[in-house]
């Protein structure tokens, strides 16, 4: 066996924020990986001492892609700390605008971030390469132009109900700030119908219900319509199911909480479904440039290690659930929600994560239509006002990339502590005190590296299959 060589990969294009990966390569494959989030931001240190309601303005600025997710988590944490509950119809509108942000993210990721990698010259000569170029080439692909137009049209709903995007203040502990009229409901339904047409014409080439009904891997791989069919043809040719395999452990906080439960269930998956116990979450700091001991987020601190000790290599903390690495994201949500195709894909690699995202895109369209159909303009959409008191609360939501949690403590009417665990913090974490690699680090092991590659294609496919958001990672 040859001695390992080392390769530093990064920065990555088409990734939100800064990412660097250090690879040990032996015999043409990745033997070990260390994922570095090199940018420190410090939102958790900005918040203490402020009025708790200020969090609703500050935390959406963590990210310009998933700001509604941050808003929703902050509102739920504040509601829990203040003993409030949102009005059911307000919760419905909050779920709808949150879902619109998430599906817009899924669509953008697939068409603009992930698929363009298959237009590279390294794949010239493959039977599908010319079609991939026609659909996904940067600035010229037909799928890219159609995606931008469809996404913009869908986001008109955010202008209508959220006032603006990103960084809306529409979601509050008691509900939402704007009550829709009957006319608004009609406009929302029309926008959703237009988005359905885009999905069924461009992405799936068939009704979303048909893709959502796929029940196993053979049925998935037989799908040959739309851009999803082109992706699956590419995935079969390159064996993307076996590339970047996960460990089969998944976590979801539950997407779109409503009066009767979550639209997509919360829970944990490790060989089978388990109930979520948020008290079992800890953040390990042993390989982070942070000071302090491993702790539950409600007791955690954010104290940067200014000396940047050599045993650490990232500003990202290492979240663990019951001491275990968990993967989070669309595939995790669909596995935990019990979809048979997702469970057939559990533990799979690049194909599984991207197919899980496409599956959720199809299922979310149906969820959004149901949410809109249930709008009752005559109802109350906001309770309140917020009555500040000493207390603590957690806000658990699902961003497009996975489980997002905010933990808030109020003392004397001011924020005493605020901790955040973002989806990419879960997926891109460094090693923990036991030396166990994070989800991406483990998935990269075994990836092929061709001679002369400085940014290996296999590594890029694996990284993008997780759809990282590094600015959220280091918040």
Image (spheres, grey):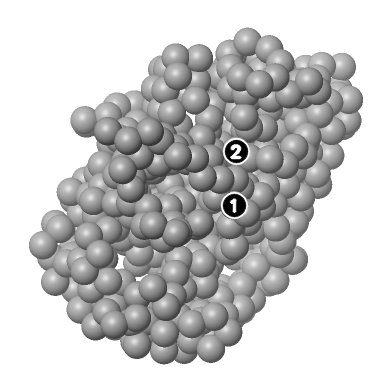
Front-most of 430 and 94?
430
Q: Residue at x 21, y 69 (%)?
A: 237
Dot placed on the residue nearer the N-terminal end, 2 or 1: 1
SS at badge 1: loop
User: Residue 388: which numbered mark, if any?
Assistant: none
Q: Position of residue 143 (x, y in %)?
A: 45, 83
383 vs 392: above or below? below
Note whether residue 339 is visible.
no
- Would you place residue 250 above or below residue 9 in this image? above
**Quadrant location, the N terminus:** top left
Specify few, some or many for label 2: CA neighbours under 10 Å numbering under 14, 14-19, or 20 or more. Answer: many
User: Residue 417: image x %, image y %?
Assistant: 76, 22
Residue identified by numbered label 2: 36
**What's the CA distance linking mark 2 and mark 1?**
10 Å
Left or right: 386, with 351 as reference point: right
Dots 2, 1 in contact, CB < 8 A: yes
Residue drawn at (45%, 66%) of the image = 114
**Count of numbered marks:** 2
Between 45 and 189, the one nearer to me in the picture: 45
């Amino acid at each position: 066996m040859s001695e390992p060589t080392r390769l530093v990969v990064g920065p990555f294009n088409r990734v939100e924020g800064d990412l660097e990966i250090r690879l040990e390569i032996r015999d043409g494959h990745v033997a070990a990986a260390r994922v570095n989030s090199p940018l420190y931001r410090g939102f958790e240190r900005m918040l203490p001492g402020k009025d708790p309601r200020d969090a609703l303005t500050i935390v959406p600025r963590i990210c310009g892609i998933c700001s509604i997710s941050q808003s929703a988590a902050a509102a739920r944490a504040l509601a829990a700390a203040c003993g409030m509950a949102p009005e059911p119809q307000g919760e419905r509108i909050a779920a709808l605008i949150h879902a619109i942000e998430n599906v817009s993210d899924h669509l953008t990721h697939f068409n603009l971030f992930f698929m363009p990698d298959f237009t590279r010259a390294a794949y010239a000569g493959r039977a599908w390469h010319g079609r991939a170029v026609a659909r996904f080439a940067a600035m010229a692909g037909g799928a890219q132009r159609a995606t931008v137009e469809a996404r913009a049209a869908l986001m008109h709903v955010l202008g209508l109900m959220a006032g603006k995007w990103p960084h809306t203040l529409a979601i509050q502990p008691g509900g939402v700030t704007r009550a829709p009229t009957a006319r608004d409901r009609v406009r929302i339904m029309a926008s959703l119908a237009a988005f359905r047409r885009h999905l069924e014409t461009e992405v799936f080439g068939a009704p979303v219900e048909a893709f959502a009904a796929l029940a196993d891997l053979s049925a998935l791989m037989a799908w040959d319509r739309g851009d999803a069919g082109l992706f699956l043809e590419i995935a079969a040719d390159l064996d993307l199911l076996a590339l970047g395999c996960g460990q089969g452990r998944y976590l979801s906080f539950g997407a779109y909480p409503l009066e009767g439960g979550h639209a997509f269930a919360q829970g944990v998956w490790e060989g089978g479904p388990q109930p979520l116990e948020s008290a079992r979450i800890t953040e390990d700091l042993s390989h982070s440039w942070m000071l302090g001991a491993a702790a539950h987020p409600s007791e955690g601190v954010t104290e940067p290690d200014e000396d940047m000790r050599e045993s650490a290599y990232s500003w990202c903390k290492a979240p663990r659930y019951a001491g275990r690495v968990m993967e989070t994201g669309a595939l995790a949500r669909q596995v935990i929600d019990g979809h048979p195709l997702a469970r057939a894909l559990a533990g799979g690699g690049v194909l599984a994560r991207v197919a899980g995202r496409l599956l959720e895109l199809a299922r979310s369209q149906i969820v959004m239509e149901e949410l809109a159909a249930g709008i009752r303009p005559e109802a109350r959409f906001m309770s309140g006002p917020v009555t500040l008191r000493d207390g603590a609360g957690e806000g658990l939501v699902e961003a497009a990339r996975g489980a997002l949690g905010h933990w808030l403590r109020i003392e004397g009417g001011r924020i005493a502590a605020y901790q955040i665990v973002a989806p990419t913090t879960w997926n891109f974490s460094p090693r923990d005190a036991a030396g166990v690699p994070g989800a991406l680090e483990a998935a990269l092991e075994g990836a092929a590296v061709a001679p002369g590659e400085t940014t290996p294609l296999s590594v890029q496919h694996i990284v993008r299959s997780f759809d990282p958001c590094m600015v959220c990672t280091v918040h």
